[in-house]
């Protein structure tokens, strides 16, 4: 399970794609007095009486998203992933040189890290933690809060034997 704290921050600040529609929000639930299903739609630019107080639709829309973000269950994801963490390919060119050559051997290597990630997680990286990427022992793994994902890399090497 991963808690998407980055999405929490985005929701609270109106920056999440979920909050793009700022014109209306529909709240559905169960009445605390009757136990019957209820549904309320709040529109921006209108005024509403809520628990005896007058509230604007804009306020109600913002309150909805703040309350939605405050419920941790909305931001938890049961996550699976598959990552190609490292792959290396080397080729030995030793057969190109005869025994009289100044160069006795040549090996070229290319290594890639974090080249592929397949996941059902909607955040940037399922292995991120509050303390940063790759810090599984920090006690904060499983909490994504504006963390830096693992970076992909490609390196080349050349080994020459004289």
Image (cartoon, helix red, strand yellow):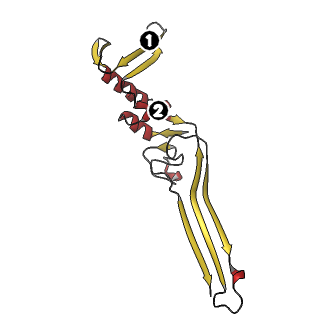
| Crowd class of label 2 (few under 14; some 14 to 19; many from 20; radius 10 Å) | few
**Image spot of residue 107 (x, y percent):** 64, 77
* Residue 53 drawn above or below residue 71: above
* Residue 121 drawn above or below residue 27: below
Asked if residue 33 lies left or right of residue 54, the reply is: right
Furthest toward the front, the residue is 96
Q: Report the residue marked by disc 1.
A: 32
State whether residue 51 appears in this view: yes
Q: For numbered disc 2, what is the local secondary structure?
A: helix
Q: Report the residue marked by disc 2.
A: 72
**Most foreground residue, 15 or 141:** 15
Labels 2 & 1 near each other (Cβ < 8 A): no
Quadrant of the snapshot with the N terminus: top right
Residue drawn at (47%, 32%), measured in percent from left and top? 72
Work out whether mark 2 precedes mark 1 in sequence or the reverse, and give the earlier one.
1
Residue drawn at (38%, 37%), measured in percent from left and top? 15
**Image spot of residue 43 (x, y percent):** 35, 19
**Image spot of residue 71 (x, y percent):** 45, 29
Quadrant of the snapshot with the C terminus: bottom right
Instruction: Classify residue 156 by image quadrant.
Output: bottom right
The mark found on residue 69 in the picture is none
* Residue 154 drawn above or below residue 29: below
Asked if residue 138 lies left or right of residue 100, the reply is: left
């Amino acid at each position: 399970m991963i808690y998407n704290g980055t999405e929490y921050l985005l929701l609270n600040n109106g920056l999440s794609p979920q909050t793009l529609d700022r014109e209306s929000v529909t709240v559905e639930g169960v009445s605390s007095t009757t136990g019957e299903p209820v549904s309320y739609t709040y529109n921006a630019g209108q005024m509403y009486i809520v628990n005896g107080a007058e509230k604007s639709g804009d306020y109600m829309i913002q309150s909805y998203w703040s309350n939605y973000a405050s419920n941790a269950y909305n931001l938890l994801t049961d996550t699976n992933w598959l990552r190609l963490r490292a792959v290396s390919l080397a080729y030995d060119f030793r057969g190109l040189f005869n025994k009289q050559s100044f160069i006795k051997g040549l090996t070229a290597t290319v290594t890639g890290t974090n080249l592929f990630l397949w996941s059902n997680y909607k955040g940037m990286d399922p292995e991120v933690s509050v303390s940063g990427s790759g810090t599984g022992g920090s006690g904060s793994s499983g909490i994504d809060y504006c963390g830096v994902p693992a970076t992909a890399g490609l390196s080349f090497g050349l080994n020459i034997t004289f």
